[in-house]
Amino acid sequence: MKGSISCLISESVPKVDTNKIAGRSGLNHQLSASPPLLSHFGDETHLQCQMTDGAIPVASNGTSGRLIPGRVEDLPVLSVVTPSFNQARYLEECIDSVLSQGYPNLEYVVMDGGSTDKSVEIIKKYEKYLTYWQSQPDGGQYAAITKGFRKTSGSVMTWLNSDDKYHPNAFITVAALFQSRNDVEWVTGRSNTFNSKGEQKWICEYLVPYSRSNYLNKKFNDPWIQQEGTFWRRSLWVRSGDKLNADLQFAGDLELWTRFFRSSRLYAVDALIAGYRCQPCSKTSLFMDEYLKEADRILDQEIKLSREEAYTDSSTPRTQIEFAEIREALARVGRVNPAINIKIHDGDGNLTLKSGHQVALEFYERLRNLNPNNCSVHNSLGLLYWQDSEAKKAIAEFVKALRIDPDFPQALINLGDLLTKIKETEKAEKLYSSFLSRNPQMVGLLNRLSGRNK
């Protein structure tokens, strides 16, 4: 699901609440398509349409998806499944974000649950580029995704719900990493969201580490693993059961991650891969309580299993892939495939892809210029400047946030922690003391938030 329903906060400027600061990964908008209870609508089945051998079409946003015709033998085949039910409002943008990647080795499957809106018309518009599609009752979202994957054979897999979308160059980035790192079996991008119009809404201020230990301690939403930006090797999928749990209605992604974690580390990649769309009719918005209850039951079972069976903790000091490594992986792919090299560089030979950190920094600087009185934006910029070792700029942003809202706890914690790190302990203690004198009931929250920055 999505990170602590922060997607419900606003349609314009993101507010950085305490859950979001922890890394608002998406509660897997798997929660946003094909509700199992509605899959009985429609009974027409549309059978397989093999993908043509030509180039991918020009995307509707004007971005050419054209890369090179046919398949490139030294790049992995990516298998992408989109489950959908009555999501015509967003479906075309979702499909476009897949096809406009221009990735040559793509298997793309759309599993529609028998929609009664204009979804089928949209799918037919792109059917010559699809490996397979159907529109019929499908047993629910997770059953549909599993059936979709069984129509594919790619060595790298993912699914994208029909109201979410990929960022440009997501596929080549993921493919290059899997090509260069044989030890990596699943990856996830920097968490981010779109508003209902598809505009960037929020970007996580830091690259999040993930581990099985956190799951076993029920820290699954602090932060969430954002499903739309998560890719994995088919070998891991097969080893972990070769299917999603179709008996689940809400937390099927989380249940899959628990199985992946039993034998493999998740690597966070400092690039924007895909984003979750915050829109009022998604499962995340409508059924968060149900998701949390289902997730809790899943983790209770996983905790019991971990106690009964010996396992190796999949946490590690470094499960993050920084942008420098991404750049090197892309360079290696580009040397072998000149057409790809051209696609990811501008006319002057500069790499067009930016790190997730840089994109986040530019995003929040733009928001600050548009709305200088938003304390959350200043706090986000403070975190980003801090990571760049620009302590003075970070302090200035945290102070601005607190001038707007003196009782904004996350900015207070961030400022206090930064002051402590630069040996200004007395100032930090005065800051905390002043806050607690006004808000004595928040001592527990303050301690919890401070622990996150350690």
Image: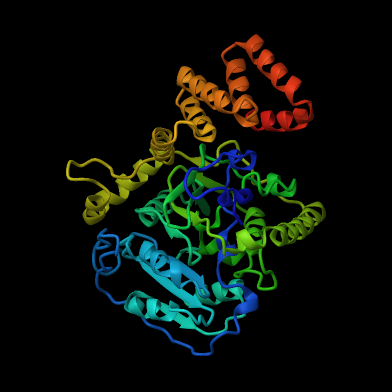
Split into 4 quadrants, where in the image is the C terminus?
A: top right
* Left or right: 298 as drawn, with respect to 453: right
Pick whichever, 165 or 229, lies toward us. Answer: 165
Q: Please, is residue 345 above or below residue 196 in the view?
A: above
Which residue is found at the position 53% from the left and 32% from the top? 375
Q: Quarter-wise, where is residue 263 in the image?
A: bottom right
Colour mode of the rendering: rainbow
428 in relation to 68, above or below: above
Camera sees residue 230: no
**Front in this rendered view, residue 1 or 268:** 1
Q: Position of residue 76 (x, y in %)?
A: 39, 61
The location of residue 114, given as percent across then percent down, is: 52, 82
Q: Is residue 186 visible?
A: yes
Which residue, as the protein is rendered here, is positioned at the far left?
A: 347
**Residue closer to the observer: 135 or 8:** 8
Judged from this view, the residue extending furthest toward the bottom is: 44
Query: Is 338 placed above or below 427 here?
Result: below
Q: Position of residue 156 (x, y in %)?
A: 46, 62
Q: Quadrant of residue 33?
A: bottom right
Number of callouts = 0
In the drawing, does residue 26 fall left or right of residue 123?
Answer: right
Q: Is residue 163 left or right of residue 448?
A: left
